[in-house]
Amino acid sequence: MDIGIACAFESRQAGSLREAIRAAAVAAEDEGFASWWGLGDREVARTSSHDATLGLYCVARATRRIRLGLAGDVLAVRAAAVRAKQLATLDWFAGGRLELGIDLDDPGADLLEPGADVADPVGRSLDRLTAMEALWTQRRAEVSSPTVSFAGAIANPKPVGDRRLTVHLRNPGTPALRRVLETRGRIEAWTAWRLDPAALDAALSALRDALGADPGTVRRTWFVDAHLMPTSRAVAADAGIDELVAVFDRVPEPAELREVAA
């Protein structure tokens, strides 16, 4: 089982935030962490922490191996072309290490422009994801959906290898899982965001129900608060979790990372 970390890009250490991120990123790679995740859109909005994408640029510059991830993009409120370019640029700087977590739930008032409304967040998010993937993989991208349409679009840079980023679905309910399967034909990866063990078990059951005969092909990641790591490892192993991620409310210090790794 892999071990990763996620954090808000805030610091309580002396010195600059950039230096705190650099020191933690170097320590994380030295300690063998598999991944470093920026918080999702909901957490960034609630905590007013620095932009997760920009924070991951700092991590990318300080590391060579560790995977980078965004824990919960609410694509229903994002412009597909703008977000596609932001993520492709980060992946280009990181040498092809970026993965994307998407949050399909209702955005809520905190993430909406005044007066805006999203009647179908799942459908809108999947439309935007399809558009982003077209921009990443096609020389002159074309897409037509209920909420996003364009033709002959040229987008650069593209992700390394002109590839689709690995997509992690965050805490999706059964209806959302089924719509993803109907729309995309696959679920590559799934994440449980700060669920307790009982809720984790229920969520994994919903995943198995949606996938049917071959649930083992989906990568499963569980995010837990950092102080719960010691008690979560055995639960994660028993549940068949592929990666356990320690969540911090700020950039962790190297000593804290050594403790998690141990």
Image (tube, rainbow, N blue to C red):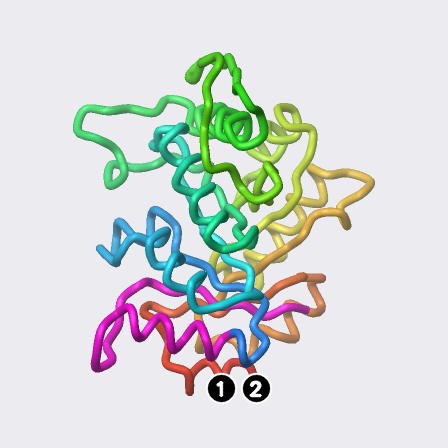
Q: Are marks 1 and 2 in contact (CB under 8 Å)?
A: yes
Helix, strand or loop status at disc 1: helix
The residue at the point 25 percent across, 33 percent down is: 112
Q: CA distance from mark 1 to mark 2?
A: 5 Å
**Residue 98: where, in percent of width, then height?**
52, 51
Q: Amino acid at mark 2?
A: Ala
Which quadrant, please, contains the N terminus?
bottom right
**Residue 208: where, in percent of width, then height?**
71, 45
**Residue 248: where, in percent of width, then height?**
38, 70
Q: Left or right of 238: which side holds 90?
A: left
- Mark 2, Cα crowd under 10 Å, few <14 / some 14-19 / many 20+, is few
Magenta stretch: give its range.
1-28
Q: Is residue 19 above or below residue 104?
A: below
User: Which corner quadrant of the image does residue 139 belong to?
Assistant: top right
The residue at the point 66 percent across, 30 percent down is: 181
Q: Amino acid at mark 1?
A: Glu
- Pointer 2 residue: 262
Of residues 16 and 116, the one drawn nearer to the viewer in this rendering: 16
**Residue 89: where, in percent of width, then height?**
43, 44
- Pointer 1 residue: 259
The residue at the point 49 percent across, 86 percent down is: 259
The residue at the point 54 percent across, 30 percent down is: 133
Helix, strand or loop status at disc 2: loop
